Image (cartoon, rainbow, N blue to C red):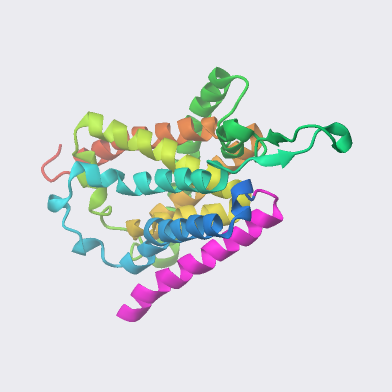
Amino acid sequence: MEAVRTIGPVVAALGAVLLFDHMTRRRGLDPPGFAEPLRRIAATVLLAFCFYVGVFAALGSIGRQGEIDLSQLASWQLFTLHALFALTILGWWAAGFLALPPIPTVAAGGTGEAGVAPAGPAGPASWKSFAEQLGLRVANLRRELAIGAVAGVGAWLAVLAAVFVFALVLSALSGEELLPQAPPAVIPWLAGRPILLRLAIAASAGLVEELFFRGFLQPRIGIGLSTLFFALAHLSYDQPIMLVGVTLLSVLYGLLTLWRQNIWPAIVAHFLFDAIQLLVVIPAVLELFRPGAP
């Protein structure tokens, strides 16, 4: 069993990166730098490592929540996965767009001095091309942020309703046996962190996770697979009822991104959901069920 826990995530990560590469080529989103094999290999190895650590390693943590010593967890460690996602995106851009050799051109008519054309679709401004692929470039940022704020509240209400219905169904089918008797240990631990740290966690999750899963992965592998990867990345919650909420959120953020053709609304919606949970809902629920509470 231990071998499966160890090898399974590695095999899954390798399969995922090969599928990602295939679908990226099919959709015409291969960066120009990938014409050089070493650049493609470097980006692929980086992405495989990211998939392993940030997505599939959680498969090996199922049933092991109690083994995590939260008292030894430093605040900066809460951001390590987000840092990995961000560095993977930057590494992909560097391998695919940065410092490309110029393409020689010949003057019209085939005579005269040869010129030099910038490589890639955007030449020296290649970041603009990649930023557009990520869904970062918009005509009216203020409007997109406002749409995201409304969507964030709506997503919170939708997930609350869905989780409630799911809990009722589980209760009807099995009594209370399948219902969680307590949240994962990390949830109340997070709720007890300083307010500024909780806000930073919500902001980091909203920005980096949406950049990676909706901005980077979704255009290349589709909303279905990006949602699956998002849910797997949160598998360490180790509770079906929470995974239902996570999966629904991912679908809603994915649809919002498809509708608006940029990721800013999803970033704001994700931040608001996490902020409401960490600052209001979870502390209130924990206080309500605290021993000795009125």
Where on the picture, by quarter, is residue 65? bottom left
Taking the spot 27% from the left edge, 54% from the top edge, the residue there is: 184
Taking the spot 52% from the left edge, 43% from the top edge, the residue there is: 93
- Would residue 128 be visible to someone looking at this image? no
Principal secondary structure, stretch drawn in magenta: helix
Residue span colored magenta = 1-29
The quarter of the image holding the C terminus is top left
Is 198 above or below relative to 175? above
Taking the image as shown, residue 210 lies to the left or right of residue 84, namely: right
Residue closest to the far left: 292
Viewer-closest of 141 and 272? 141
Taking the image as shown, residue 72 lies to the left or right of residue 283, namely: left
The quarter of the image holding the N terminus is bottom left
Is 220 above or below relative to 116? below
- Would residue 229 be visible to someone looking at this image? yes
Q: Is residue 9 magenta?
A: yes
Q: Is residue 212 magenta?
A: no
